[in-house]
Image (cartoon, rainbow, N blue to C red):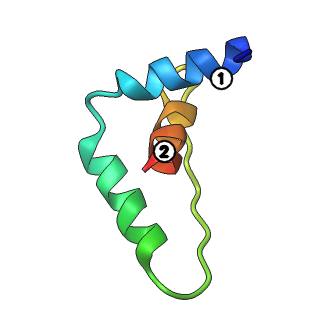
């Protein structure tokens, strides 16, 4: 049985809109060789976790 959090995260990433540029930058960084540190910051509720979940899904 799916956990509630897993279902909510899946729905949030399926409906992910408006951050194509930021997502492209993250995906490009992840594809690079070598060490990688990514710092994502912003006010609460702006979609940082959803952005990272969308990146992880791809």
3 displayed left or right of 6: right
Q: Position of residue 50 (x, y in %)?
A: 51, 31
Residue at the spot 57% in from the left edge and 62% down from the top edge:
38
Direction front: furthest residue: 1
Which secondary structure, mark 1?
helix
Which secondary structure, mark 2?
helix
Q: Which residue is mark 1?
A: 6
Q: Position of residue 20 (x, y in %)?
A: 26, 43
Q: From what the image shows, is residue 35 above or below residue 24? A: below
Residue closest to the eye, 22 or 6: 6
Q: From what the image shows, is residue 57 above or below residue 8? A: below
Residue closest to the eye, 18 or 11: 11
Q: CA distance from mark 2 to mark 1?
A: 12 Å
Quadrant showing the N terminus: top right
Direction top: furthest residue: 4
4 displayed left or right of 35: right
49 displayed left or right of 23: right
């Amino acid at each position: 049985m799916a956990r509630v959090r897993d279902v909510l995260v899946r729905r949030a990433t399926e409906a992910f809109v408006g951050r194509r540029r930021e997502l492209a930058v993250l995906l490009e960084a992840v594809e690079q060789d070598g060490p990688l540190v990514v710092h994502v910051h912003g006010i609460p509720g702006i979609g940082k976790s959803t952005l990272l979940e969308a990146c992880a899904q791809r």
